[in-house]
Image (tube, helix red, strand yellow):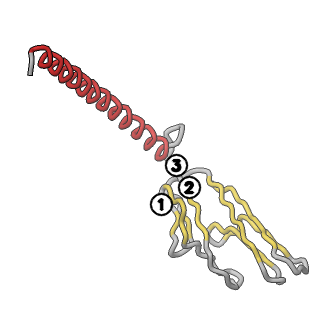
Amino acid sequence: MGQRAETIRGSYFSVLEHRREETERQLEKFSEENKKLRDEMKNITTEGEAGNPVIAFNAYTNVSGKYPMGQVVIFPEVLLNEGGGYNSMTGHFTAPVAGLYLFTAHVCNEETKPTVISIMHGKIQIALSTEYEDRSIRTCRAAMAIKC
């Protein structure tokens, strides 16, 4: 290999080495920024805006059935349980911290029989939704309650 070819080859290696080092520096910078953003996201999902913990759950059931009056409907399919307050085995929610809570329930009925849904706090009914009309089509009801 001639002198000129050796010089060009050395220049290419030098450029490649420089680019490798620059890429490693950028990767380290991006990794640090990524970690910082992940930490910020973790704080947002666990502490809310004012430093309060985020408590939320979203659950459902695919099981159709007849539920006698007073029976707890268990929603075993849990999409979200931030704070761990919902127990998918019992259907009960236990507030992990004191605060203001909003509860909603949505139930559909394919029967022509009356539908009554309640949201309970212990043995106290805090929301009620009813459907007593004669009907031949599927209907859905919702109930909402706010509780401290």
Q: Secondary structure at mark 3?
A: loop
Looking at the image, which residue is at 55% across and 65% down? 93
Q: Which residue in the structure is indicated by mark 2?
A: 56
The image shows residue 117 at horizontal and vertical percentages of: 74, 72
Looking at the image, which residue is at 46% across and 47% down? 46
Q: Crowdedness of circle 2 by 10 Å Cα count: few (<14), some, many (20+)?
A: some
- 115 up-or-down from 35: above or below: below
Q: Secondary structure at mark 2?
A: strand
Amino acid carrying label 3: it is Val
In this picture, residue 28 sits left or right of residue 49: left
The image shows residue 96 at horizontal and vertical percentages of: 49, 57
- 70 up-or-down from 54: above or below: below
Q: Quadrant of residue 131?
A: bottom right
Give the CA distance from mark 1 to mark 3. 10 Å
Amino acid carrying label 2: it is Ala
Looking at the image, which residue is at 20% across and 25% down? 17
Locate the C terminus and report the quarter of the image it occupies.
Answer: bottom right
Q: Secondary structure at mark 1?
A: loop
Q: Which residue in the structure is indicated by mark 3?
A: 54
Locate the N terminus and report the quarter of the image it occupies.
Answer: top left
In contact (CB < 8 Å): disc 2 and disc 3:
yes
Q: Quadrant of residue 65?
A: bottom right
Q: Nearer the viewer, residue 109 or 120?
A: 109
Give the CA distance from mark 2 to mark 1. 8 Å
Q: Crowdedness of circle 1 by 10 Å Cα count: few (<14), some, many (20+)?
A: some
The image shows residue 55 at horizontal and vertical percentages of: 53, 53
Q: Nearer the viewer, residue 89 or 118?
A: 89
Amino acid carrying label 1: it is Gly
Q: Which residue in the structure is indicated by mark 1?
A: 84
